[in-house]
Amino acid sequence: MQNLHGCNSNQTSLNDQMFTIILVESSLELIPTELSNHQSVLAYSKKFKKNISNTLLDNSWHFGAMKGLENEIKRGRPDIVHLTLLSICTSPAFYQNKIQVFVHTINDEIISINNNTRLPKSYHRFQGLMEKLFLTKKIESESEILIQMENSSLSKLISKINPDEIIGLTTQGQKTTFEKLTHQIKENSCILIGGFQKGHFNKETEKIIETSFSIHDSSLEAHLVASRLVYEYEKTIFI
């Protein structure tokens, strides 16, 4: 399993990966304790017979509770993480160890995903998987760690990966296209994609980014950015 502390001997090491994608400041977290007594949270917990302390925050159900929550526009959208991971982790490049993917959450957790992992297509199954991950910190199958979570900052993860270049995709960056970008990135590059609904990277993330690119004048959904990026990259290595 590729993670912050090393990798399984059956897997390619981090620096041998063609490039790394990190879903940054991702909208993936458990319901904060300060919201646990809100009516919408209690009703959801009762309806689905779920433990509030180990339930993902989801604005589809907890919208009322989230009003006024700090950094509200970047929170409560685990579906963004699900769709984006499916876009990356069902690709030939991922299965052939040409891409390594991490999730950095809004609360500074790092999720490592083994390239042998087959993520659930159903959101509800993904939700259950993530809730189990928050509880156990790892998902295993036949003694192999498929997904692992650690408390760590984005900067520490970047230091472990040690990429040749750190690229951020944002509307505030230099104008380019997916095709041009995939032809100019270095082999050991790290690409940061926002894992949230609205807004821009925070100041800490901006400090880490060395070069910013904009693919479109308006904000594009993370799963669309990821899928097109991976597709154009695969054209450079498989075609």
Image (tube, grey):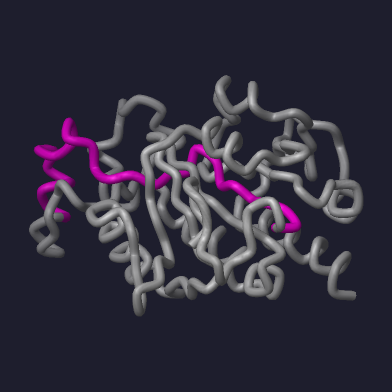
**Residue 137 placement (x, y as % from top left):** 30, 53
Q: Name the foreground residue: 189 vs 32.
A: 189
* Count of numbered labels shown in the rendering: 0
- Quadrant the C terminus occupies: bottom right
Q: Residue at x 40, y 71 (%)?
A: 144
Residue 111, placed above or below residue 67: below
Residue 135 appears in the figure: yes
Q: Residue at x 33, y 68 (%)?
A: 124
Q: On the rendered structure, is 2 left or right of 219? A: left
Residue 80 appears in the figure: no
Q: On the rendered structure, is 213 left or right of 148? A: right
Q: Name the foreground residue: 156 vs 108.
A: 156
Residue interval drawn in magenta? 17-44
Q: Would residue 50 be counted in the magenta stretch?
A: no
**Residue 14 placement (x, y as % from top left):** 63, 53
Q: Quarter of the image holding residue 48?
A: bottom left
Q: Residue at x 23, y 54 (%)?
A: 135
Q: Residue at x 86, y 48 (%)?
A: 181
Q: Would residue 28 be counted in the magenta stretch?
A: yes
**Residue 59 placement (x, y as % from top left):** 34, 47
